[in-house]
Image (cartoon, rainbow, N blue to C red):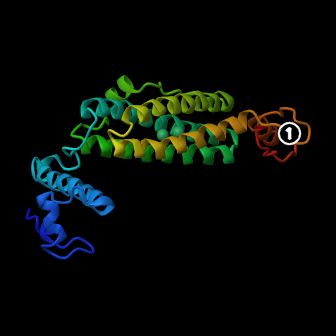
Amino acid sequence: MANHWQEEEMPGQGRGSQAQSWNQGGSSGQGVSGRGSQGELIWQNRIQKQMRDAEQNEPDGALTAGYKADPREIVALLTRAQASEWSSFLQYWHHYFMASDIHSAELRDIFKEHAEDEYEHARLFGERIQQLGGVPCDKPEDIARLSPMPTEYNHDLRSMMEADLVGERATIDFYDEIIRTCGFDDNVTRKIFEDVIEEEAHHADDFATLLFAYDGSTGKQIESIHEEIESLAKGAGQQPRMTRRAS
Ligand SMILES: [Fe+2]
Ligand SMILES: [Fe+2]
């Protein structure tokens, strides 16, 4: 890869004038503009080194010389996170089918929407594992062995939502730890988990709102939405009350 860019004029600089003084390190002791030129020299050298590094080990792709984390540790964390996502996907998918038996169309949509989110999270983590030179966790036996959270196949609506809420809350803490581990040593993985954890927070809040709804006018906890749906299904004639959880 030819480094033609290194010979190009820098913005606002004539070729062979100031650009030449950077290369000669001749800008010290020149006041503010001299310090600025020194800074430019440092960055020029760094960028040149990064270009040389980039030309080495090209098959490593996204795993560059500047990567500061231990890729084996990050891949191990990503693998467990991906196993957890597949487990969550299966759990929500199962709940989606089970909810159809008890006339819970609204909850059924939530289960399906969450299942689709977890599927996308598993895909994102698998892609990052592959970028770091690892093998994505896609085998059922590996998912069962490595997922920090077991898949819960509860069959009544309340226990399904409770299991989902607990799983989401545990996932948030797990991903928080991964984000702290990545710090600024693996910015790409950190960014992926920052985006995913935001969706997990929404998932957790969805179920907390459904399970622990409060009546805004009295401040008292009301019966949860699933009980209202069930009473509606029994012909009680009430419309479900979608109140927001008290903060
Ligand atoms: Fe997820
Ligand atoms: Fe989730």
- Name the residue rendered at 66%, 43% in the picture: 107
Q: Is residue 135 above or below residue 18?
A: above
Q: Quadrant of residue 187?
A: top left
Looking at the rendering, which quadrant does residue 19 occupy? bottom left
Task: Give the camera-side residue of 244 and 189.
Answer: 189
Within-10-Å neighbours for mark 1: few <14, some 14–19, many 20+: some
**Residue in the image at 87% along x and 41% along y:** 236
List x then y, in percent, for residue 156.
66, 29
Q: Horizontal and vertical percent for residue 147?
A: 41, 27
In the image, residue 37 above or below residue 101: below
Residue in the foreground of this view, choosing between 31 and 93: 31
Residue 197: horizontal and vertical position, in percent?
Answer: 50, 40
Determine whether the beta carbon of the residue marked 1 sits less than 8 angstroms from the nearest atom of ligand 2.
no
Residue at (36%, 40%) from the top-left corner? 184
Give left or right: position of 20 versus 149: left
The answer to whether 127 appears left or right of 86 in the picture is: left
Q: Is residue 75 above or below residue 192?
A: above
Residue at the image point whose x is 16% and y is 59% from the top = 26
- Numbered label tally: 1
238 with respect to 15 (left or right): right
Q: Secondary structure at mark 1?
A: loop
Instruction: State the quadrant of the N terminus.
Output: bottom left
Three-letter code, disc 1: Asp
- The residue identified by callout 1 is 215
Q: Nearer the viewer, residue 53 or 121?
A: 53
Quadrant of res 68:
top left
Percent coordinates x, y for residue 247 in the rendering: 75, 37
Task: Please state if 39 lies on the left or on the right of 172 as rendered.
Answer: left
